[in-house]
Image (cartoon, grey):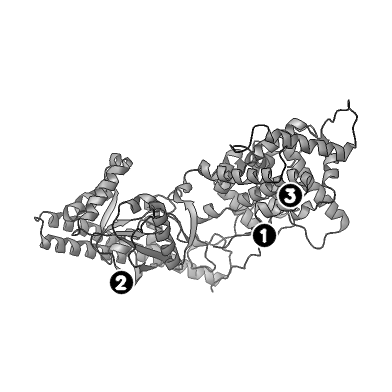
Amino acid sequence: SQGIIERDETTMEKEIAGLHRVDFEFSDIFYFCRKGFEAIVEDEVTQRFSSEELVSWNLLTRTNVNFHYVSLWLTVVWGVGVVVRYCFLLPLRFTLAAIGITSMIVGTTVVGQLPNSSVKSYLSELVHLTCSRILVRALSGTIHYHNKENKPQKGGICVANHTSPIDAIILTNDGCYAMVGQVHGGLMGVIQRATVKACPHVWFERSEVKDRHLVTKRLREHVADKSKLPILIFPEGTCINNTSVMMFKKGSFEIGGTIYPVAIKYDPQFGDAFWNSSKYNIVSYLLRIMTSWAIVCDVWYMPPMVRKEGEDAVQFANRVRSAIAQQGGLTELPWDGGLKRAKVKDTFREEQQKNYSKMLVRNGSVG
Amino acid sequence: APGAARLPLSALAHPTPVTADQIEHLHRRFKQLSNDKPTIRKEHFDSIPDLEFNPIRCKIVQAFFDRRNLRQEEDGLADEINFEDFLTIMSYFRPIEPNMDEEQLQRFRTDKIKFLFHMYDADHDGIITLQEYRNVVEQLLSGNPHLEKGAARSIADGAMLEAAQTCVGPMGPNQVYEGITFDDFLKIWRGIDIETKMHVRFLNMEPIAHCC
């Protein structure tokens, strides 16, 4: 989304270059003052963590902070919309979701009883696909898959940008993946325990997640086995609002194997899929999704990528990220998704100060 | 039911000539920073990643709470500010309007220079002493291992010397330069167009289309 202030793009160098000595010492404070104010009025990063603002109103109050009372007719239309969404669509969707989840648990438990064989794999895939499809219907999801010839193959790693918890369902609607994640309690835990019997998903205990080597080792073993389903990973680590792609954590790219990038772009016209986890919990999020008009999205399967000679994990991660951002029409930001909760690393700050001091010294102000 | 965005009425009547749209955007930003509370405290500025870059971050944040900048009677620092105060501080960074007359331009300029002066004059006594100036330069160069220990000091000393020469003229061996007063500060800035360097310009907002 477009910014609201005109950013002055002059670098520090240009600004300080033409100044006399006295002005120089005093005017460097201008530069930082102005930059500071620009950051306070608007900063690139925090913008990405709030939902995208729509230019026109789609009759969902929540996607337009700025709406004014326009006319009685519009209010009536909106009111009818509310009734339809909450009294008709919501119960329908809720029922479907319940059916989908129950079938998933029951189906995978039953299939899990069978001994390992090709029949079991086939049935497991069938159960997973069917239940995914039911769940997508429960969200009134309309998904367009592009370039299906690039669909992730067995023994590979599927990497996608992350906007909401339903990303996984969007992808499993069209193919079978081995999911990777932490073991949860509650309903999610029940689903996890049931599905892992039928299909080798990779669920980690909380304590194991902290041990990076253990995680990498397990994933490597999975990938090495060419008969196993492709792993699904979301390297950003957190939900971003679907207008940009943040830094990919390099861990996923150290495992080796073939990476199949996938770009997911939601159409905000019908419903906002972004989950702002600091603002809404999962239940209110699901409620919002189920009372939207629909979830419409595009999924692009992209040609496989492998790490090149002499490329390290970070460079590889950035290369994949660029490809995904380009395909999905998202902007790339060099920021860490973890910034939603944490502060900037000291190294960035030192870098800026180093540059400034170098110029000060060069200009002969010292001595 | 649909309703208008909620803004404090006093903010709309504020003497800063920004448009209603811009005030709305600033208000949204204010709410974002304050977590939907009516006032902001210093800690709320910690949530801005871009600001972390800035070596004079502390001074900038402090400027928002400086009672002299807030045009309040008392002295010192406020604990928290509301949206009106936020707009008051923002107004120091207004760009020049094309239809300003000589008197307005002069006042405009003086305001901006005053803002800077307050940033240097940490103890609010109306004079920038050598030590206060050294502090600012040190902050600007803080944390850089490449610069020797004495560099910040010598830059500050050199600048003060030049300022003294500009404002007081040649001094005798026993004369002591107390520090830069606000009038001296104005003298230093004579001829330099601070108005074009110290502003933040808003882009034109597109009108929001409605479907009917």
Query: Where on the picture, by quarter, is residue A272?
Result: bottom left
Of A238 and B168, which appears nearest the observer?
B168
- Decide: is A342 above or below B195: above
Label 2: which secondary element? helix
Q: Residue B202, which numbered label? A: 1
- Picture coordinates of residue B140, whole percent (x, y): 66, 40
Point out residue A46 in the picture as x, y percentages from the top left corner: 53, 52
Which is more toward the observer, A358 or B29? A358
Q: Is residue A161 left or right of residue B85?
A: left
Q: Identify the chain of the residue marked 3, using the numbered disc in the image.
A: B
Q: Distance from label 1 to label 3 (Cα)?
A: 14 Å
Determine whether B182 is above or below B88 in the image: above
Q: CA distance from mark 2 to mark 3?
A: 56 Å
Which callout, 2 or 1, points to the residue nearer the camera? 2
Amino acid type of disc 1? Answer: Phe
- Indicate the quadrant where residue A83 lies: bottom left
- Judging from the image, mark 1 belongs to the subunit labelled B
Say which residue label 2 marks: A148
Residue farthest to the top? B174
Using a 10 Å C-alpha cutoff, classify the residue at mark 2 as few (fewer than 14 neighbours), some (14 to 19) or many (20 or more).
few
Which quadrant does the N terminus of chain A fall into? bottom right
Cβ–Cβ under 8 Å for marks 2 and 1: no
Residue A91 position in % (x across, y down): 32, 62
Q: Disc 3 designates what residue? A: B92
**Labels 2, 3: front one:** 2
Residue furthest to the bottom? B212
Task: Assess disc 3: are there few (<14), some (14-19) or many (≥20) residues with their C-alpha within 10 Å of its C-alpha.
Answer: many
Sequence-wise, the earlier of marks 1 and 3 is 3
